[in-house]
Image (cartoon, coloured by chain):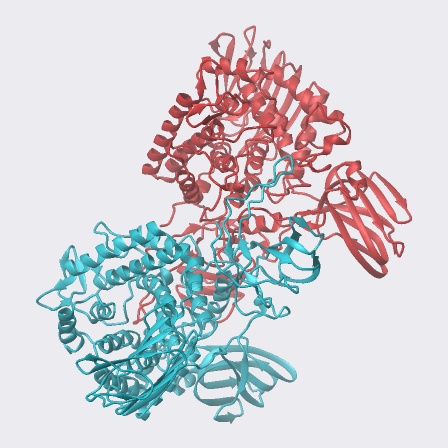
Chain colours: A red, B cyan
Amino acid sequence: MVPEIASAQAKKATWIYYPGDYEIWLGNKMQNRRTDRGAFLPVLWKMDSHYVLVEFHKEFDVPANEEVKLFVEGTYNVKIDGQAFVGYPKSITMPAGRHKLSLKVYNQANVPTIFVQGKTVVSDDSWLVTFEDKEWIDATGKVSDKSGTTYLNAGSWNFNDPVMPPSKFSLPTIPQHAISSDKQSHSFFLDFGKETFGFVKLHGLKGKGKLHIYYGESKEEALSVDHCETLDELTINEPAKKDSVMELSKALRYVNVQFDSGISVDSVSMLYEYAPLTERGSFKCSDEEINNIYDISKYTLHLATREFFIDGIKRDRWIWSGDAYQSYAMNYYSFFDSPTVTRTILALRGKDPVTSHINTIMDYTFYWFLSINDYYQYTGDKTFIKQFYPRMQTLMDYCLARRDKNGMMAGLPGDWLFIDWADGLSKKGELSFEQLLFCRSLETMAICAKQYGDVEGAAKYQALADDMKVKIFKLYWNDQKHALVHSLIDGQQSDNVTRYTNMFAIFFNYFNEQQKQDVKKSVLLNDNIQKITTPYMRFYELEALCAMGEQDYVLKQMKDYWGGMLKLGATSFWEEYNPTKSGADIYAMYGRPFGKSLCHAWGASPIYLLGKYYMGVKPTGPGYSTYQIEPVLGGLKWMSGSVPTPDGNIDVYASTTEIKVKGAAGLGTLRFKSKSKPVCKTVEIKNLGNNVYEVSVEKDKSYAIKYSAI
Amino acid sequence: MVPEIASAQAKKATWIYYPGDYEIWLGNKMQNRRTDRGAFLPVLWKMDSHYVLVEFHKEFDVPANEEVKLFVEGTYNVKIDGQAFVGYPKSITMPAGRHKLSLKVYNQANVPTIFVQGKTVVSDDSWLVTFEDKEWIDATGKVSDKSGTTYLNAGSWNFNDPVMPPSKFSLPTIPQHAISSDKQSHSFFLDFGKETFGFVKLHGLKGKGKLHIYYGESKEEALSVDHCETLDELTINEPAKKDSVMELSKALRYVNVQFDSGISVDSVSMLYEYAPLTERGSFKCSDEEINNIYDISKYTLHLATREFFIDGIKRDRWIWSGDAYQSYAMNYYSFFDSPTVTRTILALRGKDPVTSHINTIMDYTFYWFLSINDYYQYTGDKTFIKQFYPRMQTLMDYCLARRDKNGMMAGLPGDWLFIDWADGLSKKGELSFEQLLFCRSLETMAICAKQYGDVEGAAKYQALADDMKVKIFKLYWNDQKHALVHSLIDGQQSDNVTRYTNMFAIFFNYFNEQQKQDVKKSVLLNDNIQKITTPYMRFYELEALCAMGEQDYVLKQMKDYWGGMLKLGATSFWEEYNPTKSGADIYAMYGRPFGKSLCHAWGASPIYLLGKYYMGVKPTGPGYSTYQIEPVLGGLKWMSGSVPTPDGNIDVYASTTEIKVKGAAGLGTLRFKSKSKPVCKTVEIKNLGNNVYEVSVEKDKSYAIKYSAI
């Protein structure tokens, strides 16, 4: 079966591979760099591998004989129209006419990849690949018809330099220097001024003995040689002065270097390692604290965006689906780096067979499904769905096979039901939160099945989703509590109401208007309901409130919560923040004094909230084919910024008296409220009644409107 | 779930790994050494990989503190009772008392393996391993209960030297010299006297230019620079004399070395590469031609037994399930090398998901199932079934999901229905041969399910097998033809009767006595039924005849067929032999003049026939717990030999007047026919009537009987 994926004639060559394989391989490599107090600390779930033997081919119409250069990672053969060359040619001649060029590559250690460069014959994602070509020949020499072979389009990722093969890839680095360095005879103590990440470099290292480096996100951590989370222990034997760079990168603000008396060090610096992202989104407003929160959020997200979207840079340095799901959302309003999204989605998914939930967590499996729907909405990339829908199917098969007798996802041995870090959160019985995410995942399957052309699947998943939605309201809704309850235990509603299910049901748009208002009052704005202490779930809580027009309230919350971390000296946002804690206690988690990560991607959600619910920009059709701009000041005097789309930025400025927007590709709809009739010189303003006005926004055109904010 | 596998306290350490993983990794390595006229020629099916991240652990009762040395292939951590050491310790102290030692190892390029050597703390297959430890901790630091984790016992394979890790394994070599060497100014032509295998070595190589080596299993092939199947093309630039060994081993008898005038070579030899097997089985008899056939068979099998049982040493040098199935059978009567059997079975199976039949061939999937039953019968190794029954299940699931609406295995796109190389063999419709093997596979599943403790599975598979057996006779048996017909097309019997299904049904014991006799006459001894030209199917044809007591006839066939190859100068047995062909035509196959393999494992079946049906030794209980000895001379004056069992050899001598046997562990039953009353001094002879007599054979005891052969 060959998926029909349109691909224009390529202009330049790129390294190609079996789709998803490089992502898995790189994910293994990156996630196996974590250490915990000097001990290797790998992930706790299955790591998959690339296919070690891959066939690549494409048919070309070659205008005239041309020389084609071949670069290959692995042991390979090359065939034109099925005829193999002897050995491992680095260059071949493709004869004029229609010819099929194929390469078959074996590589156990690295991903089989090829780079083919001729004038018209080049490697790109229009090539087809398979891990199983079934190229039988019979006793007379006849080759099989290969009708049973599945081909996919090749994967690629801007590896456009033939001498820089994918296996050699690493993120770039630049030197960075401490803002203060306290040098003693056998030690250094450095402060790099803010949270950062990279490789410590010892300059002029000389002598013999032991040298220790203790890393700290806080000063207290770097000083705590017994409890800091990361450290290096080196045995030095350098007769002559030499610069030495640590093998593994670390998260740090402070560095505590201690060494034996036989050792001398001239100075210490670091190499900052970073993902080369473009800052496309921006936000600025009348409130300097919010501007600060936005900037630190973006820095936090940038630090935690590496080869993949990871959770935190000190720990776990792994790809967690729930964390990544939020990074994707923030990314759509900042870097709009789609390759990092798909890389992360693919690394998380790994390969069949599915032997556990993603990251072993049930909710994280569901976020994985949801992330594909979001990705499609923001980027419009159908190719991704066409390539990977089968992996969605098998993961959903895994879920469906784990339903209990009531058709619910209750959790079986080995399933981690996470939801959130929260004291005493019950995981017993059938949790409403998991069913809600399951339902949304089934809806996503139905949408993707349609895109893939799986009509039967689309109907099946939609029916399952519909059924689950009915169940959720029938079984969990409580008229007295005006909310969905937390769980069912032996078929009975638990007394417990938590924020999680209710807030997700708001922005999933599962409630009717009355239920929404009930839930807002009885849950979201009710202080008797257990509070959320992680930025992770604050993300969704504030999103739900924004979705209900509570931008004023949320702005105060943001200033309170993220502002609270800033007041404690945060230079990046944390894994968890509890305003009731103080002193060094603020750094403790997991029973360890410095267990908490102080640079955690899920801490950066203001990027998303400000972009989507204040500037009010979001796609309404795949890839911003249509979109909405609904600026809401939420108490700000003015705000100004940009939201990236696949085809340029949408610029938004809003004050209490003026709105200015510039459209990107696609058709936008600007909607706003005004006390008085708004005025625009260039475009007609539609009056929708109730003080609501609407303007159509076209590609690259600018609009300035005088109005009077409500 | 932890399988209960008994394992005695180990005496010595060995390298251990995730079971099945080293086999897959080594299979990839070995099968990717094939070249075809200098071009890399890998397999056409999916190659799997080892798990790249594996946790190993075991609890020990340590009598006193002991030092434990650690050897690891990969990046690793070491924990005692969950507490990790810093860095990568090469030696640790295990404290006295009960403690859990665990290592977690990451290795992408090679299999994660460990070697742990203390006084009592050693690595062996009593350790448990997993690819997914799910070791969650919650926000307070509490570790998960891990009830959802699946552990298996570690795999191992006599890698007992800590400094020779599994990734460095290679077969041994010894120098071998040609029996004739024709040296010219720019060439050598060598004859090594017989089929052999290894690395050509150029002695005193010097100069600059091109050098070609053309390999030949026949003289004609080595001389045919344009059509020999394997060759090396080297670019030489050696200013000083140097010995040079080729990188890849080759099958050869003749070597044709040609080089440019700027090059000189002193002499050419080779390094013979071999599997270090013990020749446990033996056979000698009154017929020198049969002795020759037996010896050449054993040499053929030895050459084709390498890291795994492969098909042929020139080509394909791959592991084919149908070919290997025969090698296992021969191996039980010669080397009795069980590790090579399990290695081959595991490499063939690979990992889930199953995406095609084994080697893409439906019948080869079925032989894979059958091979496990045979393995269990000959070795009694239950551990193997306990470890790998889940992989049997998922492969059978794959088969069951591919049945047609009649519940038959008819072949879907991508399925190769092989049966045999035979002109015009129809593959249309539902083939009786495939259903027969499918039925036998289901029976094997039922047996293994019982061993594994899967009661429900045992019942399910038995019911499916019973149903299929009924169908086979209802749908394929033809009373007029006195045979099972070849196929059903649209529910109608085809006219065609072939030998395949009928001969298998004989030794599967599916026929009643009348059907057996009918089939013998109307099919097996009927020259109007298409003849078999491959030793591959001759194996089963002659087995069926032997199973019906036709040893006299089969002996003549053996002399005719295998003797025919010897008369053509064979020094090992071939992939195919057609007595009607002559001249260089005898080497042609697959449309290529030297396409035929002249050393093919399936050519060695006399080993099996002579051991099982002439010496008449076979297990009747798992691992020869009980066994039969039924010597049949088949026209020979005398024969003498040994058949290996897991616990020593069974020795058999038989002439027309005397039978002598020595038992191995287990309880044997010697049965024979005699015209007159037989005499034995040491044991009672039971008279079963009809001139049949029986003697019980005990462990290591010898029995001599005077009788008069019928």
Q: In the rendered image, which quarter is residue B585 located in?
A: bottom left
The residue lying at 47 percent from left, 34 percent from top is A373
Q: Residue furthest right?
A: A185
The residue lying at 77 percent from left, 32 percent from top is A584
- Say left or right for B330 vs B383: left
- Asked whether A3 or B62 is in front, the reply is B62
The answer to whether residue B568 shows anywhere in this view is no
The residue lying at 19 percent from left, 74 percent from top is B530
Picture mark count: 0
- Say left or right for B376 vs B112: left
Vertical placement of B22 versus A649: above or below?
below
Quarter occupied by the C terminus of chain A: top right
Q: Position of residue A306 (x, y in %)?
A: 63, 43
Q: Position of residue A365 (x, y in %)?
A: 49, 38
- Asked whether B424 or B234 is in front, the reply is B424
Q: Position of residue A394 (x, y in %)?
A: 41, 44
- Asked whether A680 or B673 is in front, the reply is B673
- Asked whether B575 or A218 is in front, the reply is A218
